[in-house]
Amino acid sequence: MKFIAGVAATIALLTLSAVAAINTGNVTDGIRLRAEAPAIKIPTGEPVVVKGSLTNERAGKIALGTTDPLGGFRIVIVDAKGHSVRMNKSGRDLVKLVHRSKQELAPGEKIEQSLWLSSLYNLKKPGKYKITMTHDVDASNGLGKETVKSNTVSVWISKR
């Protein structure tokens, strides 16, 4: 009996650990990138908003380089059939704009960006969508850039 209770407790702890990892975002080389959807069920035609946050967990500053109107966040959206959702014309036009600002994050510092995905992507069809973010940062070894990837969030666009 004690063995079964111990196994159940271990499974519960592993499950809670997995949920916590999903909710805190992924860490790559001391950089945490988290995606968060304030609403997971959204009626057709309503805004689909996802917030990205990038946190420096390294001991030193990181340079993010040149940013764009999306704050350097890149989005990958996949529908229920596994097909990538393409950016619409408004989204493509927006990401062509480049701001020549150099941004740095001190240790423990975080940037956040709320992205109205429904204005950037064609998300009019009802269904389940999986959303993942990426962001480029300076590599910790000082040689080039690396891409960090967030956790994946799911949203369901429902018929009105």
Image (cartoon, rainbow, N blue to C red):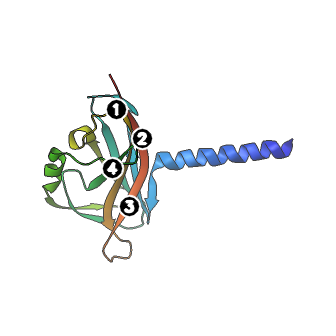
Please name which of the two marks, 4 or 3, marks the residue nearer to the observer: 4
Q: CA distance from mark 1 to mark 3?
A: 29 Å
Q: Is residue 52 left or right of residue 45?
A: right
Please name which of the two marks, 2 or 3, marks the residue nearer to the observer: 2
Picture residue at 25% right of the left edge, 38% below the top: 118
Q: CA distance from mark 2 to mark 3?
A: 19 Å
Q: Are marks 4 and 3 in contact (CB under 8 Å)?
A: no
Please name which of the two marks, 4 or 2, marks the residue nearer to the observer: 4
Work out whether 13 lies above or below 60.
above
Mark 4 and mark 3 lie on one chain; the one further toward the N terminus is 4
| Quadrant of res 54 | bottom left
> Amino acid under label 4?
Ser
Mark 4 highlights which residue?
Answer: 84
Q: CA distance from mark 4 to mark 2?
A: 14 Å
Which numbered disc covers residue 114? none
Mark 1 and mark 3 lie on one chain; the one further toward the N terminus is 1
Mark 1 and mark 2 lie on one chain; the one further toward the N terminus is 1
Q: Residues within 10 Å of mark 2 (few under 14, many from 20)?
A: some
Which numbered disc covers residue 154? 2
Q: CA distance from mark 1 to mark 2?
A: 13 Å
* Image coordinates for residue 123, horizontal then vertical, percent: 28, 38
Q: Residues within 10 Å of mark 1 (few under 14, many from 20)?
A: some
